[in-house]
Amino acid sequence: MAEIEETHEEGMSFWDHLEVLRWALFRIACCLAICLVGTFMAMPHIFDKFILAPTTNDFFVYRWLTEISKGMIHFDPNFSVQIININVASQFMTHIHTSFALAAICTFPYIIYELWKFIEPALFDDEIKHIRPAFFGGTVMFFIGCAIGYLLVFPFTFRFLMEYELSPSINNQINLSSYIGNFTMLVLVMGIVFEMPLLAWLLSSLGILKKHMLTEYRKHALVVLLIGAAFITPSSDPFTLMLVFIPLYVLYEISIRVVKD
């Protein structure tokens, strides 16, 4: 117990650090609650224009890619999906679920800031110099990943699955819960995947990962990344596959640059 109570920097004990962490978590919870109220109130106004936008051919990404590809990418002009609800409470629960997911994304920078302020006093000056850019760079990468998930990964995955036809006698009726579940999963997964360089840097700092390991197994990594991209976007269109694979490969190369020798 004497060791646990041993004072650290600025005379703070182990329990003092726990108290600081408790207040940091409390502030994060308050910020999240405030954002949740805001997103809950705004959700009826943005649900159709933002979350359900990929269900119609009017989605700006579809129109933009059609224009820049000059007909190489063909989209069905009549594409439109009607989302149905079969459970009494699904619309209300979806309202809460999507509001919370959006609030969590919006408060992500503040969460990172609070975590950084908690661990910063325990670091040396040279460690702070290297870790601060990693923390805040990871925040930017998270938002870039979420944007790619929303603009590219989810729309093309959803569209492929909707247009895939096992038998003409089968009509697709998409449940609200299924749509929202896939939407939030793919967007957040891409945000997390874009944290790859930060994870590589942390593993390198712990001595677990070395630069030569990533360079020697680059060819194997390419195959793994290609399989991963194909898993995320199960489409037969090579262009769609490359839209996911290229960012993943760029992230791998960035990871090599940030990893220590």
Image (tube, grey):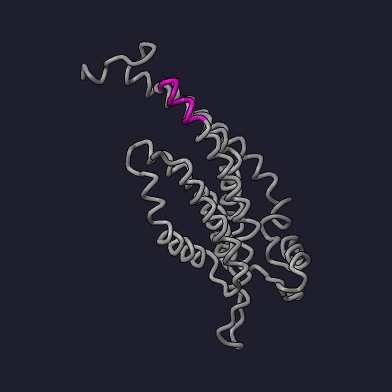
Left or right relative to 44: residue 204: left
SS assignment for the magenta stretch, majority: helix
Depth check, front residue: 127 or 14 = 127
Res. 58 in view? yes
**Picture quadrant where residue 209 is located:** top left
**Picture quadrant where residue 105 is located:** top right
**Residue at figure coordinates x 55%, y 37% from the top left:** 137
Q: Please, is residue 151 above or below residue 173 in the view?
A: above
Q: Please, is residue 161 above or below residue 115 in the view?
A: below
Res. 115 in view? no
**Residue at figure coordinates x 31%, y 14% from the top left:** 7
In the rendered image, residue 125 lying in the magenta stretch gets the answer: yes
Q: Position of residue 5 (x, y in %)?
A: 27, 17
Per the rendered image, the range of residues in magenta is 124-132
Left or right relative to 235: residue 17: left
Q: Position of residue 177 (x, y in %)?
A: 56, 62
In the rendered image, residue 237 lying in the magenta stretch gets the answer: no
Q: Quadrant of the N terminus?
A: top left
Q: How many marks?
A: 0
Q: Position of residue 146 (x, y in %)?
A: 59, 50
Depth check, front residue: 67 or 111 = 67
Q: Please, is residue 133 above or below residue 89 in the view?
A: above
**Picture quadrant where residue 91 is located:** bottom right
